[in-house]
Structures are given as structure tokens and as C-alpha cells.
Image: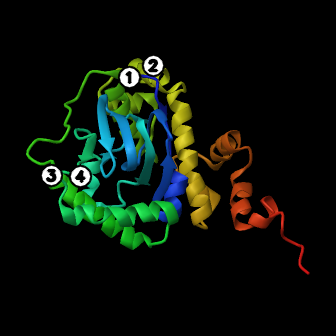
């Protein structure tokens, strides 16, 4: 598997906001190079998978896995037919590990079934069951993940993490840039302010982002802010003005304009569609009672 500089940026904000963690099970589903601002844990249930994570090939068989920190480019393909359970969650889902997740020096940790202690491995069947059925509560899932990660981390202590010092590469610049935008999404994110904060020439910031993501930095920031606004629209009753300012927009007018550009409807209509789902997505079998 070859590393590529053409990767895409994905977001799981809406799915994660609904439960705190988003999990799914897939069979023989390969992915191309991508990254996101959430943590990803992949556990191989069967078969064998080759992961490309931060430029390194990792061949992982059944019972193993990999924990991928935010803004780390990764992809996977099967070398033997099988299945993988994937868990996506924010860096604040497990507060004890938050500083580790947000470190730019440790892009991933391998779940090695030969070295991971038995007490940690005992959590895996329950997590796999959750990815299939969502049959346990969020608090229990937190506990299962905390125990599993607690077992994974000591197994890789003593300098065996895949630590990478800052590299003068477009990918490393993008990773820092994306992390900075995430941390300051409600603040001034002009090209000048970002370049100053990262100590990078403004024109280089703009060009390297456009080259790797096939979109302008301003478009990405707007998309990120609208994703944040969508979560607030469906999970709170805050007024539009408050949501607009909390998401980093300078005015309600600019918020409304950008929202409609990206979503095809104004934010008030978007909120109403979730509060009154019957109006927007009627069920075909409704209204036919004997």
C-alpha cells in the first residue's frame, strides 16, 4: 500500500454528538487515505488487514487493532477476507486519555494481542458486540474502552510509541493546521492569524491546504462551523444569534447565508425538520390503520 498526499478530511461530529461515540461493523470494506478530528479505534474481528497509518504499513490479524489519534492520515485494505469493528469518538470522551489523544507526537498505538494483558483483552468481545447492536449504555462503553486502553498503553511504554518529531512536510503542516482550527473554531481564523500562530508564511498555509484537500481554507472553516451549528440546532434550544456567535460567525446574516449555501435550507428550517420529522420524512406505512 502506497502513501498518498491526496487524502480527504472527514467529520463524524453529527454521529458522535448523538451518542458520544459512533461505532460500526464492516466486512471487506476498504478505505482510501483520510483523516478526521476524532479518535478512531479499529479492531480486526476476522481476516487480515493492512493499515497505512502516518506513512507506515501495519499488517494486523484477528484480535489485533490500532488506535489512531486525531488528524492522522490512514487507510486500510484487506489482505485476507474478514471484518473490522470501528469506534469513533471525540478526544474528550475519555478524559484520562485526552492529552495523549491530542499530542502531535504519537499518531497511533497498535493493539497487539500477544502483548496486551488479559484484563484488557477481556473487554474486546463486549466492544465488538456494541459495534453490532448498540446494546449497552455510554457509561459502560467508556469503562470498557478505558480498561482496554489502560492495557494497551503500558505495553508500549519506554519509548515504543510511534513518536514522530516535527517534520517539514505538507502533511505535518496540515495536521498542525487542522488541530489549530479545531481548537480555535470560535475565534478569529483569518489566514494571517493562523499563519502567525503556527509561524508559517501565509501563502504557504493557503497553498498546502488547497493542494491536499482540494478546497480553500475558508471553505473548510465554514464547513466546520456549520457542522458545529447543526449539532447545536438539533441538541439545544439556543436562539440563532447565540449559535451563530458561538460557532465563530461575525453576524447572524453571514451564518444564515453560509448555512443555506452548504445545506440548501436556512438553519430555522433545518431545526424544524428534526423537531417535526413527520413533516420532512413521512413513513410509507403510516396512516393505514384497520
- Residue 113 point in image, percent of width and height: 23, 52
Q: What residue is drawn where x is 49% and y is 54%?
A: 24
Residues under numbered marks 1 and 4 in contact, where contact means CB atoms less than 8 Å apart: no
Report which residue position mark 4 lands on.
113
Q: What residue is drawn where x is 17% and y is 42%?
A: 161
Dot 1 or dot 4: first in sequence order is 1
Report which residue position mark 3 lands on.
155
Dot 3 or dot 2: first in sequence order is 3
Relative to 245, 156 lies left or right: left
- How dense is the environment of label 1, judged by Cα within 10 Å: few (below 14), some, or many (20 and up)? few
* Secondary structure of residue under mark 2: helix
Q: Residue furthest bottom?
A: 290
Q: Taking 271 as reference, is 81 above or below it?
A: above
The residues tagged by marks 1 and 4 sit, at their Cα atoms, a distance apart of 26 Å
Report which residue position mark 2 lands on.
207
* Mark whose residue sits in front, 1 or 4: 4
Dot 2 or dot 4: first in sequence order is 4
Dot 1 or dot 2: first in sequence order is 1
The residues tagged by marks 3 and 4 sit, at their Cα atoms, a distance apart of 10 Å
- Mark identifier at residue 2: 1
Image coloring type: rainbow
* Mark whose residue sits in front, 1 or 2: 1
Q: Relative to the observer, which residue lies in front, 195 or 168?
A: 168
Q: Quadrant of the C terminus?
A: bottom right
Amino acid at each position: 500500500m502506497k502513501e498518498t498526499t491526496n487524502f480527504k478530511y472527514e467529520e463524524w461530529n453529527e454521529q458522535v454528538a448523538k451518542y458520544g461515540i459512533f461505532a460500526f461493523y464492516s466486512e471487506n470494506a476498504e478505505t482510501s487515505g483520510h483523516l478526521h478530528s476524532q479518535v478512531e479505534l479499529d479492531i480486526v474481528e476476522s481476516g487480515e488487514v493492512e493499515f497505512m497509518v502516518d506513512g507506515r504499513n501495519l499488517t494486523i490479524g484477528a484480535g489485533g487493532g490500532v488506535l489512531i489519534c486525531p488528524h492522522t492520515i490512514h487507510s486500510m485494505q484487506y489482505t485476507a477476507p474478514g471484518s473490522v469493528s470501528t469506534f469513533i469518538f471525540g478526544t474528550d470522551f475519555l478524559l484520562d486519555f485526552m492529552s495523549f489523544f491530542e499530542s502531535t507526537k504519537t499518531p497511533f498505538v497498535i493493539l497487539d494481542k500477544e502483548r496486551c494483558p488479559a484484563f484488557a483483552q477481556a473487554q474486546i468481545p463486549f466492544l465488538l458486540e456494541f459495534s453490532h447492536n448498540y446494546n449497552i449504555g455510554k457509561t459502560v462503553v467508556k469503562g470498557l474502552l478505558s480498561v482496554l486502553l489502560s492495557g494497551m498503553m503500558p505495553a508500549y511504554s519506554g519509548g515504543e510509541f510511534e513518536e514522530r518529531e516535527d517534520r517539514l512536510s505538507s502533511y505535518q503542516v496540515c495536521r498542525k493546521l487542522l488541530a489549530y482550527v479545531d481548537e480555535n473554531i470560535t475565534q478569529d481564523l483569518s489566514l494571517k492569524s493562523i499563519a502567525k500562530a503556527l509561524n508559517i508564511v501565509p501563502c504557504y498555509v493557503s497553498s498546502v491546504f488547497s493542494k491536499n484537500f482540494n478546497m480553500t481554507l475558508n471553505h473548510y472553516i465554514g464547513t466546520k462551523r456549520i457542522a458545529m451549528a447543526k449539532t447545536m440546532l438539533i441538541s439545544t434550544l439556543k436562539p440563532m444569534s447565540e449559535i451563530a456567535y458561538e460557532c465563530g460567525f461575525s453576524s447572524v446574516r453571514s451564518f444564515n447565508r453560509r448555512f443555506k449555501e452548504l445545506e440548501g435550507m436556512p438553519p430555522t428550517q433545518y431545526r424544524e425538520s428534526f423537531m417535526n420529522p413527520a413533516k420532512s420524512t413521512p413513513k410509507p406505512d403510516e396512516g393505514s390503520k384497520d
